């Protein structure tokens, strides 16, 4: 069953927006919420069902308290949307908007863990979302002939889409301002997974209102049951997915245990590859697959004997040829894992070079899959910054110069350019790199470098 999106939860809550453009936007929304609230103040229609209002407030608090963590997303979904929108339909745009904004208030928003402007933004946009949905719905209901359930259902859908548009649009705009990212990119990434969730919960909101009218509060409690079952099923899916990710990481760790000098390499390559793919605006699904495949990019090395894999010095020609087989062995392994099969070619070609001098097939330029070109850069970038028995770690400046030198020959110039831009961000380098980078910066590592496969 689909779960509904609770957009206010998707707000990053790390650093305060201050009076940045995101902060100004939060204040603008607050002003808009005050004006809209003042206009709608009498309630359309007015409510005298205060017991019902209080009941729905409790139900929204309950459903909001049980969110589900989303994979790879900085947020959660909850099934509260159905209950919030039901309260809008039952108690009008003003009261419904208030219930939506107040019922979903989180403990950490009250304890000061979330910056004040972010709380202001969250509450304002939720009030405006509920109120917009309500105004749309009641305007349509007033304009349509009464007593036609199909038209009422249509009005419910339109009102719900209005709620959705204000909720998601304002959240995505806020996040784009705060994180200095493209609004349209964030929007398309969100809409793809949020629309089915919202659409799935709209009919539930419609039926919920009918049940409340016919049976009362007990009927709504019965409605909560399938929503909670849906939540449980989704949580099971998330946990299964976590097991899958842990298994992949364990496989990579098993490989790294054979070659301690590459400790953490797979995770860091995955980190760099996803950062690059994100900046190149790959779809969320593509980024997720690349994340897993990158962790396993050298998994084929489990088929390479220890005397070659752990050799500290240069390879002989024969050893080099044996080592080069790892990309094909890795591709064969991934080809047998249904969820990762699509990434088998990325592993197969992650040692191809942009100028055609790589292996195993000597592919050139765009003949190489884009993900493999990203992997090649991420893999080499990590190797540059790592200290190995046969080479010193480069400093960031040296790595930058090396990337530029190899752009267009070993590496795809577009990918290099993206990585060079990303290097301006100090958060690009994971914490596990600190000791290596510091050592390199301090000159505490041997200076000789030998040509060798990474
Ligand atoms: Fe490799």
Image (cartoon, helix red, strand yellow):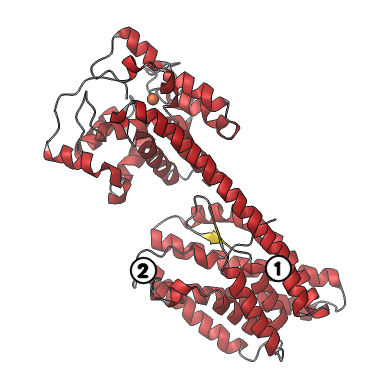
Q: Is residue 329 left or right of residue 412?
A: right
Quarter of the image where one finds residue 295: top left
Q: Position of residue 72 (x, y in %)?
A: 49, 50
Q: Is residue 210 above or below residue 275?
A: below
Q: Is residue 137 above or below residue 175?
A: below
Residues at circles 1 and 2 in contact by the CB criterion of under 8 Å: no
Q: Position of residue 38 (x, y in %)?
A: 56, 89
Q: Position of residue 195 (x, y in %)?
A: 64, 57
N-terminal of the pair, mark 1 or mark 2, is 2
Q: Is residue 277 left or right of residue 416?
A: right
The quadrant where ligand 1 appears is: top left
Find numbered disc 2 in the image and state the secondary structure of the residue it sits on. loop
Residue at the spot x=43%, y=29% of the render? 297
Residue at the spot x=55%, y=74% of the render? 104
Front residue (pair 378, 300) = 300
C-alpha gap between disc 1 and disc 2: 36 Å
């Amino acid at each position: 069953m689909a779960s509904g999106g609770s957009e206010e939860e998707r707000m990053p809550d790390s650093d305060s927006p201050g009076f940045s453009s995101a902060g100004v936007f939060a204040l603008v929304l607050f002003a808009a919420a005050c004006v809209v609230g003042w206009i709608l103040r009498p309630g359309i229609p007015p409510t005298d069902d205060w017991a019902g209002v209080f009941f729905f407030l409790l139900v929204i608090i309950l459903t909001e308290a049980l969110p589900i963590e989303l994979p790879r997303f900085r947020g959660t979904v909850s099934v509260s949307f159905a209950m919030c929108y039901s309260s809008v339909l039952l108690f009008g745009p003003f009261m419904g908007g208030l219930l939506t904004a107040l019922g979903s208030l989180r403990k950490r928003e009250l304890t000061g863990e979330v910056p004040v402007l972010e709380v202001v933004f969250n509450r304002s946009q939720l009030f405006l979302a509920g109120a917009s949905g309500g105004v749309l719905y009641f305007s349509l209901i007033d304009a349509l002939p009464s007593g036609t359930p199909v038209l009422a259902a249509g009005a419910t859908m339109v009102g719900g889409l209005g709620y959705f548009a204000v909720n998601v649009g304002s959240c995505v705009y806020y996040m784009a301002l705060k994180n200095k990212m493209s609004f349209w990119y964030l929007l398309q990434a969100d809409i793809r997974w949020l629309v089915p969730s919202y659409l799935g919960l709209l009919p539930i909101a419609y039926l919920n209102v009918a049940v409340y009218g016919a049976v009362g509060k007990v009927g709504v409690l019965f409605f909560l049951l399938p929503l909670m079952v849906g939540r449980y099923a989704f949580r099971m899916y998330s946990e299964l997915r976590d097991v899958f990710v842990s298994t992949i990481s364990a496989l990579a760790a098993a490989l790294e245990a054979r070659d301690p000098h590459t400790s953490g390499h797979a995770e860091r390559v995955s980190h760099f590859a996803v950062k690059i793919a994100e900046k190149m605006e790959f779809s969320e699904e593509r980024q997720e697959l690349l994340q897993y495949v990158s962790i396993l990019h050298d998994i084929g090395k489990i088929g390479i004997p220890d005397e070659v894999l752990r050799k500290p010095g240069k390879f002989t020609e024969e050893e080099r040829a044996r080592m080069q087989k790892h990309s094909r062995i890795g591709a064969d392994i991934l080809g047998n894992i249904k969820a990762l099969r699509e990434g088998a070619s990325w592993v197969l070609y992650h040692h191809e070079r942009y100028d055609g001098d790589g292996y195993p097939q000597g592919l050139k330029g765009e003949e190489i899959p884009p993900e493999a070109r990203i992997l090649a850069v991420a893999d080499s970038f990590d190797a540059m910054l790592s200290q190995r028995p046969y080479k010193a770690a480069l400093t960031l400046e040296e790595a930058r110069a090396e990337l530029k030198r190899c752009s267009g020959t070993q590496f795809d110039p577009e990918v290099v350019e993206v990585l060079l831009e990303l290097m301006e961000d100090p958060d690009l380098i994971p914490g596990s790199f600190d000791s290596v980078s510091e050592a390199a910066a301090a000159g505490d590592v041997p200076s000789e470098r030998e040509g060798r496969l990474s």
